[in-house]
Amino acid sequence: MFGEGILKGLAETARNFVGSFVSAERLTTVQYPEERIAPIEATRDFPFLVYDGADWEAGLRCVACQICEKECPPKCIYIEKSVDKKPDYTGRPQIYPKRFDIDISVCMSCQICVEVCPFEAIKMDTEFELSTTDRFGGLLYDRKELAKSNEHYHKIHPTEAAEVDARLAEEKAKAETKAKAAAEAAAAKAAAATAATAAPTESKAGGGSQA
Amino acid sequence: MIKNADQIFILLQHWVMSFFPAALQPIVGVLLAVVAIICVFPGLFAVAVLLERKGLGRMQNRYGPNRVGPLGILQPVADGLKSLTKEDIVPASADAVVHFLAPVFLVVIVFMGYAVLPMGRNMALVNMDSGLLFFFAMGASTELSVFMAGWSSRNKYSLLGAMRAVAQMISYEVPLLLSSLVVVMMTGSMNLTRIVAAQNQYTWGLPHWYIFTPWGVAAFLLYAIATTAESNRSPFDLPEGESELVAGYFTEYSGFKFALFFLGEYVGMLSVSGLGTTLFLGGWSAPFQFLWWVPSWIWFFSKVMLSICVFIWLRGTLPRLRQDQLMNFAWKFVLPLSLLNLFVAGLWRFLGEGLARWGVCSAILLVAYVVMARVGMHKEDFGPRSYRYAE
């Protein structure tokens, strides 16, 4: 009422002023180019393409199904399918993208492409220092610029990447058991067929014995 | 040696003058002093801006500018270069001549005030008998420049800012003059050099500064409030309230004209700090008698910079006032108190030496302060506002 509020305020700012020189935890500023803090795990900015193994071209998980291209709200993905086929991670021959471009000046980082991808082939990156002097070509990323290893994915989003790997391994195992079962069934069927054609008397005899 | 250090600028001036013929010497002397003032105070402006940005940062637990040069001390240079190289935009519908003249006028007027300030022993450019009056005349003219800027820009924010500025500056001009009048009453002179000389006396090693008297403290506080409002500083920064009016009266200014407004504001702040120092803090006199050997100009400039630091501290602390609070505060609190202070100063003069006048004068001022604060808060003049329809 008599100005003591002003004095209290002045004392508070004085405390801040002196405190900022004395205690480091008061200054929360991270002086960016020199100091950095690790991005939180859920950080995302622009998509990248995951590849397995050492060779990015051979290991791309993308099969050029074009779902992401169709679902992309700002239409920043451009895909061209290949005519030939290459084996994918399960060993099945698949079509691969001959051209896969993302215009990151158009991308709005919505992550819809990641959510619709059935092959875990496209994921969100955390790289944010993307400035370039060429605003047209420099911001249109092609296949090679987009391809990043699965190890990189593990580094930036460890939890998510572990889940994805587990799911892929499970699928692969399922596919393998299915293939094995199919192979076995086929073998058994083939064996049965050969047996059936080779020994009809046996079955007759069996039937006879049963009767 | 000590005397030479004290008078170093005067000696330099005379040394340069000795190269010219006798007929030209007075003109050269004045020109030198003017050039010195025009160089020193923009330099201090740069220091003040840097202090303000770093100090405010620290008060808000930030670093403040620390990129340009070591610890960011070259930031003012970068700012100056930036404003020099920016495009100078004049709105198509603006009154181009007035729009151009406003910042020039402001800077010229603000520098005029320094003519009468004694910045050290024998260091007043003009030893004018009506120095205080001249200073206030120049100070009051800045309102014209502010209104020129606001009116000629043809922008609603500029005009609103200018309106607010004129209302505020004219309201606070009155207590500003009345609070400094007590000093004139006591000294019996409006000559700033004589006001400083009157304070440059010591009893038991302590100075006779006017701030060490009851009426002096009251007048100094009222003067500080009024000058804060005069120089449009927070918490009285309504004319340029950036959250309401973009930038107030200089919304439509860019490039170097904007920088001139900025310069005018800070140089004006430095000049009112200098006047406050002269009137109440003993000008260039030392705070203790045993420090007499420190050059007088060091005392003057350190007192001015100290006042600037207080301005910055206040800005870092106080929120902006509302327009009605501002006006009520000026007319219902500061003005009556400064009028009462005139009476108290007269009482002090006629009560004679002794402890009695200390008691009587302090009691009157304290009681008036308490009663007026209570009444003012009770009547919601400067207290929280109650809303009739809202809430």
Image (cartoon, coloured by chain):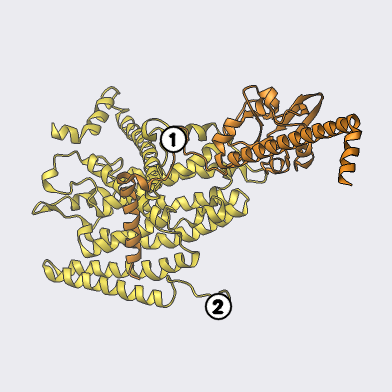
Q: Residue at x 22, y 73 (%)?
A: B363
Residue B259: percent from the left, percent from the top?
49, 40
Q: Which mark is residue A139?
A: none
Residue B372 appears in the figure:
yes
Apparent side of residue B57 relative to residue A105 in the rendered image (left or right): left
Q: Residue at x 72, y 31 (%)?
A: A62
Residue type pointed to by label 2: Arg
- The quadrant of the image that shows the N terminus of chain A is bottom left
- Secondary structure beneath disc 2? loop
Q: Which mark is residue B388?
A: 2
Q: Quadrant of residue B264?
A: top left
Chain under callout 2: B
Q: Residue at x 40, y 74 (%)?
A: B377
Apparent side of residue A73 relative to residue A125 in the rendered image (left or right): right
Q: Residue at x 30, y 40 (%)?
A: B125
Residue B25: percent from the left, percent from the top?
30, 29
Q: Report crowding for label 1: few under 14, some 14 to 19, many 20 or more residues within 10 A (C-alpha).
A: few
Q: Which chain is yellow?
A: B
Apparent side of residue A120 relative to residue A18 in the rendered image (left or right): right
Chain under callout 1: A
Residue type pointed to by label 1: Glu
Q: For the view shown, which residue lies furthest in the left direction?
A: B204
Residue A137 appears in the figure:
no
Q: CA distance from mark 1 to mark 2?
A: 53 Å
Residue A36: percent from the left, percent from the top?
46, 36
Q: Report crowding for label 2: few under 14, some 14 to 19, many 20 or more residues within 10 A (C-alpha).
A: few
Q: Which mark is residue A35?
A: 1
Q: Quadrant of residue B213?
A: bottom left
Q: Which chain is orange?
A: A
Q: Quadrant of residue B298?
A: top left
- Secondary structure beneath disc 1? loop
For discs 1 and 2, the disc positioned in front in the rendered view: 1
